[in-house]
Amino acid sequence: MSDAFLKGRVAIVTGAGRGLGRAMAHGLARAGATVIGAGHIASDFEDFDENAALPGRIIPVVADLRKPAQCDKLVARAVKAGGVDILVNNAGLTFTYIWPDRYRRETPHRFWEASDEIIQNVMNTNYMIADQLARRVAPLMEQAGWGRIVNVTTKLDTMNRSDSSAYGASKAALEMASEIWAKDMAGSGVTVNCVNPGAGAHTPGMAVEASQRSREGKLPRFVEPDEMVPPLLFVVSKAADRINGFRFDALSWDTTLPPIEAAKKNGLPAGFRLHERVALAL
């Protein structure tokens, strides 16, 4: 899906300066979208080129989206660019932020060892940013009669594993919110779905030690950032107009199949009915 099928659409991607967010921002731009790429570290955007040879374009915006006023400004920037058709809630703080030595120590951390500040920052970044932006853009999408909200969560056995607080709790909150928002938006032309790595990802937010262990086969395979793009482009496509309240994992997405067939094979309900396969509305 690289034939400018999103021409004229405007997408917001959070955490767009690096890793998964950067890959998804460029993937949407290659498909023709104007992408408002948000991040809070200005240096991450130094090599972003708004005038790159892409069917669409990427507009970097430096913002701390934990602050509601910054969310207002981001949405206003998207509206100025033409509207808000797609929201990709990708910004996140990972295990490495919570426990910098997580993959270098022999014993796991316990939840009470984390500071109040760390926990609040994780919950604000991994859940509250998504919630704040979704509440701002959903009415605009509903009024337009079309929209896509895409949340990046993680798999259940990452959410509930030991040594995962507060990362797992924040992603569980976003996963359940995805199911609720999908129900709230049903019939509006706006869909809410999850696109996930399905395991870890080789990104700057992941500990070097963990990525190395994955490449050596000592941990499950981690996805490369570009692997997030095919399932993302499917859920924002016209073919997915009736796909609402599902989750798709990049790790098991089969790029050898047509997107619809890959989605049928890959999709599960969002929320925690992860072993309940249901027929996709295709």
Image: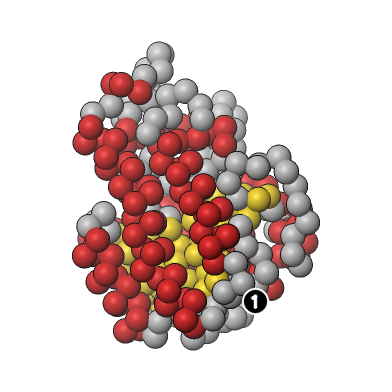
Q: Is residue 218 visible?
A: yes
Against 222, residue 43 (above or below) is: below
The structure residue drawn at horizontal position 57% and vertical position 26%, both measured from the top left corner, is 218
Colouring scheme, one of rainbow, by chain, secondary structure, one colour: secondary structure
Residue farthest to the top, as pictured:
107
Q: Is residue 30 above or below residue 251?
A: below
Residue located at (45% from left, 36% from top): 168
Residue 16 at what x, y percent from top left?
38, 61
What percent of the width, then of the height, locates residue 62?
Answer: 24, 64
Nearest to the observer: residue 13 or residue 76 = 76
Describe residue 264's horizontal placement relative to residue 240 as left or right.
Answer: right
Is 43 left or right of 89, judged from the image as shown? left
Query: Residue, x 58% and y 46% (percent of image)?
Result: 271
Q: Nearer the viewer, residue 278 or 35?
A: 278
| Res 57 quadrant in image | bottom left
Between 52 and 259, the one lying in front of the other is 259
Quarter placement of the C terminus: bottom right
Residue 152, how many percent across, how many down?
49, 52
Q: Can residue 13 be seen in the rendering of this structure?
A: no
Q: How would you rate the neighbour count of disc 1 (Cα within 10 Å): few for under 14, some for 14-19, many for 20 or more? A: few
Residue underneath mark 1: 238
Label 1 secondary element: helix
Q: Is residue 157 above or below residue 26?
A: above
The image shows residue 269 at horizontal and vertical percentages of 65, 50
Q: Is residue 272 left or right of residue 151?
A: right
Taking the spot 49% from the left edge, 56% from the top edge, the residue there is 151
Which quadrant does the N terminus fall into?
A: bottom right
Amino acid at dot 1: Lys
Q: Which picture quadrant has residue 276?
A: top right
